[in-house]
Image: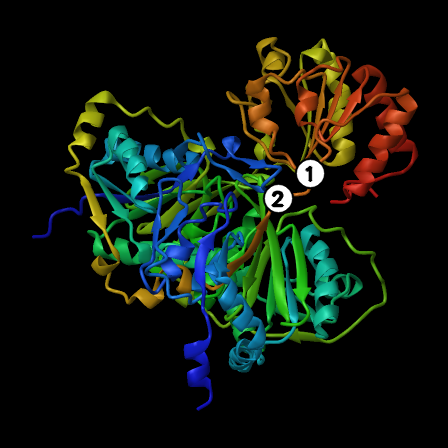
Amino acid sequence: MEEKPHKKKKPRGKARLIAGKCIACGARCQTACPADAIEMNEQGEPIIDIEKCIGCHKCVKVCPASALEMVFTPEEEKLLTEMAVKSIIEEDEAEQKKADANIKSWRGVWVFVEQSDSKAHPVSWELLGVGRTLAQDLGVELSAFVLGSKIGGLADEAFAYNADKVYFIDDPLLAQYRTETYLQGALSLIRKYKPEIVLIGATGLGRDLAGAVATEMRTGLTADCTGLTIDKNRHLLEQTRPAFGGNIMATILTEKVRPQMASVRPHVMPKPEMQPGRSGPVIVEPFLLPADQIKSAVLEITPLLTEGSINIGAAHVIISGGRGMLNPDNFKMLFELSDLLGGVVGCSRSAVDAGWMLHERQVGQTGKTVRPKLYIACGISGAIQHLVGMQDSDYIIAINKDKNAPIFEVAHLGIVGDVFDVIPALIDKLRTSGARTVS
Amino acid sequence: MAKKKELHIIVTVKQVPDTHEVRIDPKTNSLIREGVPSIVNPEDRNAVEEALSLREKHGGTVTVITMGPPQAEEALTEVLAMGVDRAVLLTDRAFAGADTLVTAFTLSQAIRKLEPCQLILCGRQAIDGDTAQVGPQLAGFLNLPQVTYAAGLTLKDNALTVERSLEDCIEKVRVNLPALVTVTAEINQPRYPSLFNVQDACGGKQLTIWRAKDLPVPHEMLGLSASPTWVKKIFAPEQGKKGTVIPGSEKEMVKILLEKLKELNFIQ
């Protein structure tokens, strides 16, 4: 009863755009406005009609760039400070309670262990590493779930990499990945055991599966996260990922639906230390889709090794050579280095034009656009047509004699030196130090 | 007597900012959008090209659909000029702010309104978000089998043979129609818009605009409010060491390189 006169008296203010902060996110504020007070200009920025604005704050809350604020007259300001923000806090608490009730039945952090021929993809263990931290911060269990055929051997490995519990569906029908069968398997586990967080490696297979699972669960899925943390107050997963080609970072929440799903690309999270001897419960569930009910439209799968047809676009590590390699023989050291780092050899257009390398390895505008985790440019000056094909790589190392070479403009680490000194020395060090590739 | 079903292919496209041109203003921490051109997402153009070449071989029609602000019409004009038969623009305030799930849902509702199709082609991913999620999510809402990352496809007797480009192999898959396929840039070289088609496209006859009221769903199921994910904040990435150049002796350089490779978790 007391609330009502309060609300009438309480100054609500008017929304205002903070100059230069709008990112033209797609008219979220306009969508949120119940009073039709917002129009968008050609740059995608809001124009607020203060006559129409009812001071509801909705646009301010919804703005991802914090580009909107409420403005008050000095008299209003004074009144506001007098009236404590008690009512707002109460409102928030009520909302919180309601949401909590809906989602508290979902508990635990799950990591999908991707395998083929009973061998796990290393991204699975990387996810168990970050999953451990998330589970600790939430005070819940960390579980691994595995789908496949004859996968029993993966349980010990999952425990050694942090899992408290392992869920299996082991069935011959899951021997080969198919969206339909893996989707059914994953859904049956998730629906039965209700994890609050599901992490999946953003590999080809993982992205194919994650989208399908999230759709059936009608839940949020955040792709290619580079940061995963817990909002400890609200028990929410904070999912940070790059957008606009890495020019901007966004932190994304899935507040009201469970599970919270995120994918992470290989090599983004560090692989945890193995702890042999750790153990825990293994829960085995049946695969419930009978063979004759599988309407799978996939009739034939013929894996082809990429012998002779190298796919540099899919590689996580690319060692590229350019005109500075001087002749095709010198590329041998790049192949040696790429073997040591688990990568592939690419090249610039000059190397192809000179006939040293095949076009399938060419990076750039007229070749492939690549975004590996690591790109090492050796003796490449960095013509713009090459740069556009590789500048979005996560980490770029350039080795070139010419300190003014444009490649250094995009390199995270630039080495001014002779590739014929640096590369052999690096290969030598890698061999003698016994360093091995992580994947 | 029922005549043979004519092939109808639907292609989804997205108008995106050319992300190579997007930069952050270091002072205001906001996106610099002035002069940033909007383009048809590159891999969506590959999907359009694939649909057109299938039409050339097998006959039929190609419909392109997009969701976006009113200016996304430019993207449709471009694909009409490439030669597609019909284009549908979903634009409405109620659609704004949709995440991938709700975008896929909205597209699925519009696609159900169109003539039944045998094949849906999507680009693998859009360059502004890189999620690769809308294709699989659309397949989910339409109950279609999905085949992702197609680097080649052939259609014969109502079945597609698709070469999927995966990390370490090319996987050959056969799938019966109807199906949804997402394509990669490797699949073809998109044709240029033709002047002849441009004239047609500008006539506007093949362009349909649908608003939220044209779809059989309540507004609560659309746009930002229906989306499970929510962007809490946006910020500039930590400045990389771009441009840092390390001179020094060969030994020092190699030492730095090794440390970096360890730090980046490539070797241990």
Q: Please tell me how crowded label 2 is: few (under 14), some (14-19), or many (20+) other residues with Cα within 10 Å.
A: some
Q: Quadrant of the C terminus of chain A?
A: top right
Would you name the residue on which mark 1 appears?
Answer: B239
Which residue is painted at 57% across and 37% down in the image? B24
Would you name the residue on which mark 2 appears?
Answer: B236
Residue situated in front as seen by the camera: A243 or A33? A33
SS type, badge 2: loop
* Disc 1 + disc 2, Cβ < 8 Å: yes
Residue A247 location (% of width, % of height): 58, 39
Residue type (three-letter) at the residue carrying disc 2: Ala
Residue A366 location (% of width, % of height): 50, 20
Residue situated in front as seen by the camera: B113 or A46? A46
Q: Does residue A4 appear left or right of residue A65 in this picture? A: left
Residue A377 location (% of width, % of height): 70, 23
Residue A338 location (% of width, % of height): 74, 30
Q: Please tell me how crowded label 1 is: few (under 14), some (14-19), or many (20+) other residues with Cα within 10 Å.
A: few
Number of marks: 2
Instruction: Look at the image and name its color scheme.
Output: rainbow
User: What is the chain letter for disc 1?
Assistant: B
Q: Residue A128 sits in which quadrant?
A: bottom right
